[in-house]
């Protein structure tokens, strides 16, 4: 089994491949790490004192975007939920976009 892991910024460079996976009826779980921008590039720019230009943006509604391409789109509600969604995704005949928000409450281990 294969799982795709992509950040939200990088995903937008190859979003058209989601349509290809849909057309091929691939049971492909895609974990989308949503953190609101090109964070790796932002970190590199900050470390070199370069002003942040073109690396912060507004994301589309990834769930609706996936659904518009005949894929399932689901936002994770817990860490356990993510594991279940990956396993379920392997058994489907279409891709499953699994959106994980970096700032979600389920990451707090108080």
Image: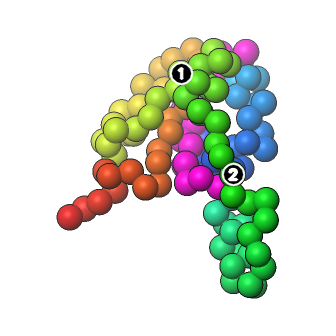
**Viewer-nearest residue: 45 or 20:** 45
Q: Between 16 and 37, which is closer to the camera in this rendering?
A: 37
The picture places residue 64, in percent across and down from the top left corner, at 58, 24
Tell me what residue is drawn at x 57 percent, y 15 percent.
Answer: 93
The x and y percentages for residue 70 are 63, 15
In this view, 86 is above or below 78: above
Q: Which residues are magenta?
A: 23-37
Residue at x-position 74% and y-position 35%: 15
**Residue 86 shows up from this direction:** no
Does residue 28 show up magenta in the picture?
yes
Q: Is residue 20 above or below residue 3?
A: above
Q: Nearer the viewer, mark 2 or mark 1?
A: 2
Is 105 part of what is drawn in magenta? no
In primary-sequence order, the first of circles 2 and 1 is 2
Residue 83, position in %: x, y? 38, 39
Query: For the view shown, which residue lies furthest in the left direction?
Result: 110
Q: Where is the N terminus found, in terms of image quarters?
A: top right
Q: Residues within 10 Å of mark 2 (few under 14, many from 20)?
A: few
Residue that label 1 marks: 72
Q: Which residue is mark 2?
A: 57
């Amino acid at each position: 089994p294969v799982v795709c892991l992509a950040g939200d910024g990088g995903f937008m460079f190859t979003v058209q491949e989601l349509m290809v996976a849909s057309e091929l009826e691939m049971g492909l779980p895609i974990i989308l790490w949503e953190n609101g921008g090109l964070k790796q590039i932002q970190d590199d720019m900050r470390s070199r004192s370069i002003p942040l230009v073109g690396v912060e943006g507004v994301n589309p509604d990834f769930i609706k975007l996936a659904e518009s391409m005949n894929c399932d789109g689901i936002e994770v509600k817990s860490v356990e939920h993510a594991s279940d969604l990956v396993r379920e995704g392997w058994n489907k005949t279409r891709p499953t976009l699994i959106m994980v928000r970096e700032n979600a409450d389920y990451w707090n281990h108080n």
